[in-house]
Image (cartoon, rainbow, N blue to C red):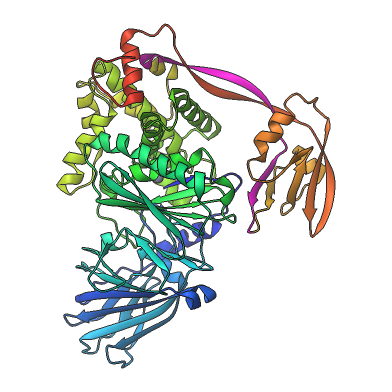
Amino acid sequence: MTTCTPGVTQPLLRVMTNLVFALQLAAVASAPISHIHYEVTADSANVADRTLGVVTTFDVDGSGQVMLALPGWTPGAYEMSWFARWVHDFTVTTADGRPLTWDKADYQTWRIEAAGAKSIKVSFRYEADTLDNAMAWTGHDFVLFNGTNLFLYPVGRDVTSPTVTVHTHAGWRVATGMAAAAAPGSYGAPNYHDLVDMPFFVGRFDIDSVRTVDRWVRLATYPVGIVAGARRQAALSAIAKVIPPESAVFHDTPWSSYTVLEIADSSFGGASGLEHQNSHVDIITAQGLESDFIPSLYAHEIFHSWNVKRLRPAEMVPYKYDAPEPTPWLWVSEGITDYYADLAEVRGGVVGDSGFYDLTAGKIDQVAAAPTSALTDASLTTWIHPTDGSEYVYYPKGSLAGLMIDVIIRDASDNRRSLDDVMRELYETTYKKGRGFTAADWWGAVSRAAGGKSFDEFNRRYIDGREPFPWDTILPLAGLRLQADSVRELRLGVFSAPDSSGHVRVVNVEPGSSAAEAGVHSGDVLVSIGDVAVTDVNFGAHIRARYAAATPGTVIPVTVVRDGSTMTLSAPARFRTRVSAHIAVDPAASAKAKRVRSGMLKGTVGAAAS
Ligand SMILES: [Zn+2]
């Protein structure tokens, strides 16, 4: 997953749902069932009342109670959501319509008395009203759903060859990574894990494809027309450019086709992607569709189709759906995925070398601004959404750890080996052998790539420990150096997000700030600040540029709409000095350091230098 959120999000509800996890009862295995088939009805009547019709049919192959559960989470989104919360009108009958008795065994499990029935039909409506890539949502002519939201599983039993039929209008499309089955509108998967790893778009949306690494990659975007013309060409071009360097890391492309499922909506703050085995779902604020972050989002989510969807920490193999699966390795699964997103951009030609350095420096700034936190600790604790600012630090800090390990390996091997070798070895020796990777697998592969060098101290200080990363010794090995620039900038102290109409609304005002002194309130719609119109959430950069040279105390008019009235408030200009990282090429770099740098940027090993 990846998330870029200007402003503030409020995940309090999810934290609450997590706390009740401890109350659930021990699960009892279901009677064996087979021929499990799901029917999802998603048409204009469904979107009008924002619910989906879900019917599950199956045969009962033994005696005892049938125990059916809905997942508590969608893999990749590391939080407990409990999809049973959105189930309405749960009904159980025999195939010929005779009602059967049921009750709840815990809050996500239904216990059914089969009473000798050979075939059972379970029906419910599912409230599809949450714009979140792990969940289900309806637009006015469109539905997104994840299998984790809708598809019941028999507790403690494998599911073999489940099938899905989607009922919708003629003229409404369906896009999913799932393979089409023989019946019209039907799809199939080998097992439950694969079934719930292939989300669906149903409705009116744009779809086309681009060819890369000898595969078709589809781009499905909703609403119709939002990613069109030059914007669409840029998206397809970025997708086609970032995939070849990613495939080259593993010498393998593990999907026959890939589908990018993208929703743009002005009510969504920032951008978020959620990975799957041969697709991913992006939700992006409509104002952010041309942001530089978009190619990075594609590169990150697509790299996940190798790293985490296939090569995965042992703690998450297999996925279990009724409890969290905490692991100390999200810094590899997410952070190193993000390092490879940056590498895919530079190796694929989406950004130049300086663009890669800027992305890296930005991560150094992000880590500097976050509380000091060990990568292993931040990885483990994300499930409870810590509020101290460490929640997602394993993304930028894990990415930087990946860069350090890559440079150390390239330096130790005179650029004959790299982090690519580590990723490829683990992919072959763990994922392809049907298991997850352990600490011994990871550090063993890293050490082998570096010619037997021990990483025990490195791990103790920088991964499991909290020491600052030693840029002054690492970066010169790649012919680079870190500079710290002091930047004086205006700070008003407002946090904002787009509302459902696309207006930029104040979410929070920092106590004691310039905005607080001016009387800006949470809920105000920002119209203008000084002579800069506020048209999107990126207004801060324009205002900082406009007032960079202002005298402290200068009054800046802030125009807001509050309860339908427009008012202009007076904010005194206040400044803060921020230290900003900058990575520069070292003109005195040795030939070896140049080889390391070139190898990292180009994805090559060996003696060639530029
Ligand atoms: Zn991710």
Q: List x then y, in percent, for residue 10.
A: 57, 54
Quadrant for the C terminus, please.
top left
| SS majority, magenta | strand
Eyeballing the image, is 65 above or below 555?
below
The residue depicted at 79 percent of the width and 37 percent of the height is 530
The residue nearer to you, when weighing 179 against 53, is: 179
> Is 221 situated left or right of 187 in this image?
right
Write the start and end of the magenta stretch as one range. 476-500
> Is 406 situated left or right of 546 in this image?
left
428 inside magenta stretch = no
- Figure quadrant, ligand 1: top left
The residue nearer to you, when weighing 52 against 467, is: 52
Q: List x then y, in percent, for residue 577.
A: 66, 25
Eyeballing the image, is 145 above or below 91?
above
The residue nearer to you, when weighing 575 against 461, is: 575
Eyeballing the image, is 404 above or below 101?
above
Count of all numbered marks drawn on residues in the image: 0
Q: List x then y, in percent, for residue 361.
A: 49, 26
Eyeballing the image, is 245 above or below 256?
above
* One can see residue 225 in this view: yes
**Residue furthest front in the image:** 229
Q: Residue 83's quadrant in the figure?
A: bottom left
> Is 186 situated left or right of 90 in this image?
left
> Is 386 situated left or right of 563 in this image?
left
Q: Residue 439's quadrant in the figure?
A: top left
* One can see residue 379 in this view: no
Q: List x then y, in percent, for residue 121.
A: 30, 83
477 inside magenta stretch = yes
